[in-house]
Amino acid sequence: MRVKKTLLIAAAMSKFLINPVSAQYWKIQSLPISTRWDKAVNPKKPLPEYPRPQLTRANWTSLNGLWDYAFTAKDQHADKYQGKILVPFPVESALSGVKKSLQPDQNLWYKRTFIKPTTKAGERILLHFGAVDFEATVYINGKELTRHAGGYDEFTIDVTNALIAGSNEIKVKVWDPTDAGYGPHGKQVLHPESIYYTPTSGIWQTVWLEIVPKDYVTSLRITPDLDNSSVEVIVNSANSLPVTLTTAGKTVTGKTNQRITIKLTNPKLWSPDDPYLYDLKITLGKDQVKSYFGMRKIEIKKDAKGYDRIFLNNKYTYNLGTLDQGFWPDGLYTAPTDEALAFDIKAAKAMGFNTIRKHIKVEPARWYYWTDKLGMLVWQDMVNPNQGLPEGSKAEFEKEAKETIAQLYNHPSITTWVLFNERWGQYDQERLTKWMKETDPTRLVNGHTGELLYVNHQLRAPSDNPYVNSDITDVHAYPYPMMPIRQTGKAKVVGEFGGIGVAVEKHLWDELKGGWGYDGTVRPPVMQKQYTEMADTLHFLEQKGLTGSIYTQPFDVETELNGLITYDREIIKLSPETFRAINAKVWPATKNLATATKGFSATIADTISQDYAARLKEYQQGRKDPAFLRTLAIMAVGQKDNENAKKIGQEYLKVSPEPFSEADLNFLVGFTTSSKDDSYPFLLKNYKKIILIIDSNSVKGRTQDIVYREQVAPLLTAKPDWNKIFHVIQNNPVGDGERLIGNSVIHYLNATNTGEANAVRNAIDAATIYDDRFHGGAYNDWAWMIFQRSSDQKDLEKALAWSKKSVDKEPGNAAQIDTYANLLHKLGRTKEAIEWEQKALAIDPQNNDFKTAFQKMQKGQPTW
């Protein structure tokens, strides 16, 4: 009977297990949820809008559309291309048509042809890239023209001399190691979970050609000056030439690369209430470009009560904000359409916010255009350096931070730069905060948001000298807001709080896992109560000097369910009117609400849903349709009704419609808990095909957990035969066995009483068999366990060797360096230990454990 059931599942799956990307066509790949704008994506003309609204020209050509793509080993050239990819959607996204991860040891290649535009004598042809993550090498007709590193900033190439009449070929080679590299990567990681999400690799913003005359405007720097009723403009160009500027009915002349001041009569101010924008026309010889600017001023001043507040245009303005990650289920970093891009700002506006903190991401220029046009204050995060601070990361971070400020300088909506977030790669804070303020004295600088981080009133990481050189003191407090510390001349803000999780059925990224909130998940009525309590707290703190707050967050992101709106932007968890009314307890909604939110729509979540018991009764009475079974199985998991979850889940797998979706494969893995399940042999047989569609780690992890539980764990006796265990691991049916090795060794790493006198001895014996098979973190775990539990010279020397391997594999990891230093000290090599502990402190100077260990080493005291 079991064979027949397995064949049933295999037959249902067979049509689905086809290579999801054909070389002959492009299509949006399957997703558990997607946005309403998918249908508007035209593969012949995706994102057709002019991509740089603050410096526009008429003569341009978009290169967005279908390109050829290929994956190769990092040291190989692409000879054959594997299919079509839709530019500018990242290769991991469904909208790219590929939906495949780029690994650190691979290159991603793009190729397409285009006809050389017709030009007049002396004209140049520029090739622009909005952003390519991470390192891009660009070739025209086989010739390498440039190599650019940095996944968030634009770059331009003059390709005139490389082009030929007629058809031309462009290739782009991309290397993107994501969190395994030295560059800033934000919230995207190779193995997404919790607060980290699916990576974005390759071209993810518009690519376009532009024709310019011989002498042309390269960039603008626009600085409003409210106090003097004027605006200062610097028109940058390769040469010093006459230039003409026209705005507000006035025309002035000057020279490029020099300050040009335009006086304005009774200037109209830009604010969230009235985001007035001035048109600006620049003429440099034959080059004519259009731009815009807003007249606004931001500063810290004392109010009538003596509190240091944020003032906008000489008026106290509470910054009521939300933490926007900028991720999309279908496009990841790239919104499906320009309308979708604007929707996110309209949504925040509709809920009563006047501020968005753009969290560890730099958006395309059109996103900032919409914040300028609709009226939204923006706190712009720098994209943090790799948290391990490997070699080259500091220089890359500082380069990209400089480019970010220059690239976004002209947007009136951006009022605050945010340097560091919660110690993620934090270093040289005093120097870098000072540099940032000197680079742009027209804006506020938040030197470290969440340097003091509280979770349930527990301080996670104290600081000796917080907010040095900053304009702001900023605390993160989950779930309820707290008052930050007071420092003279600095505004007090809550840089993050909230995180109320609400799961909306049929609008989840992972229906089986569901998702999480900072304090669990609740239903909308409970959310309303909690959100109201938070607003009441903010109102009280505002009366005591609080001047800004950032709620986490406007939208769910993958399995993080802390959004006020679902990830697909379809369901708002309370009505916009409810959110506005609650937020108005702190600060009133902006006056341009009606015009700025035109086109915003979302369905309000039901406040009452059928409970699990009622649905289970329907099932017992005979309801067995696939959609119902799937939902009920997932609910059973949430209710921890494991017996029914497994029974109903397996029943669904036998009746589910074909072809299966990616979500069904994840469902299949999730409901496979034993080698006796019908789905288990199917996973083994089709492993190589399945991992082309879903994350290989989920399949490998589930099958190896079964092997461990059923075959390895019974062998882990008081005196285990490690060679026999290793034989089982070597012959496991899926993957390399690292998970099995880890589980078996950890069995002893965590043991306090294994039935033998020497648990340490067992751990060393086990780990020695598996030596050279682990990443640095595992070696560090082994070494630290020995450091804590043994004083035997040979044990410590073995642990020191493991620790050195961990340091060599991950040289920027302060915790692993600290382990190495402690082992040296315990072995009596204290001089070396002090030197290594100093290295750990240089990476993480605020770590109190490191400081204590260093002081004890200096005094010759034990650290164990």
Image (spheres, rainbow, N blue to C red):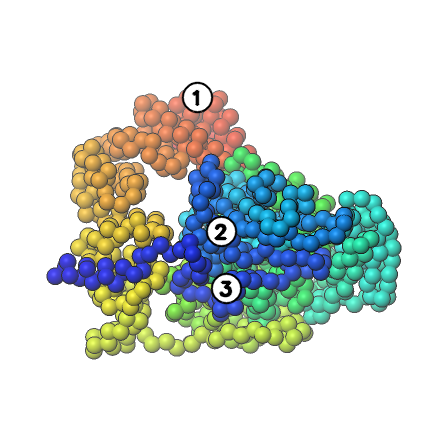
Circle 2 sits in a helix, a strand or a loop, which is it? strand
- The residue at which mark 2 appears reads as 68
**Residue 428, located in which quarter of the rendered image?**
top right
Q: Residue 555 carries which label?
A: 3
Foreground of the two, 303 or 700: 700
Residue 809: give x, y in percent of width and height.
Answer: 43, 33
Dot 2 crowding, Cα within 10 Å, few <14, some 14–19, many 20+: some
Circle 3 sits in a helix, a strand or a loop, which is it? loop
Q: Nearer the viewer, mark 2 or mark 1?
A: 2
Foreground of the two, 494 or 781: 781
Confirm whether residue 295 shows in the render: no
- The residue at which mark 1 appears reads as 829
Q: Which residue is drawn at 83% across and 61% down?
A: 246
Q: Distance between the residues labelled 2 and 3?
A: 33 Å
Residue 694: give x, y in percent of width and height.
Answer: 36, 54
Say what amino acid the circle numbered 2 marks: Asp
Circle 1 sits in a helix, a strand or a loop, which is it? loop
